[in-house]
Amino acid sequence: MFNAERTILATLTSICQQSHQALDIIVVDDGSTDRSASIVAAYAEQDRRIRLSGSRTRLLRTHATAAPLPPMRSF
């Protein structure tokens, strides 16, 4: 999830209302700068199937784009 403040509550509500109840819902925060993580954390306190996890994806993406690409070769 990245800056999903406007949609995350509706998304979690929809997932949790599904007829299949044996769910493990893992929400990965990709460095949100809005209230997304706090919304998920509050929802997770009420529903033990939801877990909020941090992510290094944003850091890796930033690092990868800063690194020069190897030269392309064709034959």
Image (tube, rainbow, N blue to C red):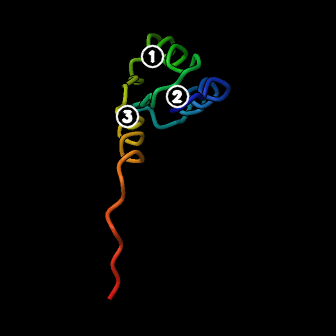
Assess whether mark 2 and mark 1 are in contact (beta carbons under 8 angstroms): no
User: Judging from the image, what secondary structure is the residue with disc 2 in?
Assistant: helix
Residue in the picture at 59% in, 19% down: 34
> In the rendered structure, which disc, 1 or 3, sits on the residue that comes first in sequence?
1
Q: Secondary structure at mark 1?
A: helix
Q: Where, by quadrant of the figure, is residue 17 drawn?
A: top right
Residue matched to label 1: 44
Q: Quadrant of residue 68?
A: bottom left
- The disc labelled 3 sits on which kind of residue? Leu
Q: Nearer the viewer, residue 24 or 67?
A: 67
Q: Earlier in the sequence, mark 2 or mark 3?
A: 2
Tag nearer the camera, 1 or 2:
1
Q: Nearer the viewer, mark 2 or mark 3?
A: 3
* Image location of residue 75, percent across then percent down: 32, 89
The residue indicated by pointer 3 is 59
Q: CA distance from mark 1 to mark 2?
A: 11 Å
Q: Amino acid at mark 2?
A: Cys
Q: Residue at the location (51% across, 33% down)?
A: 1
Cβ–Cβ below 8 Å for labels 2 and 3?
no
Q: Would you place residue 45 above or below residue 67 in this image?
A: above
Amino acid type, callout 1: Ala
Foreground mark, 1 or 3, reads 3
Residue to which mark 2 is pinned: 16
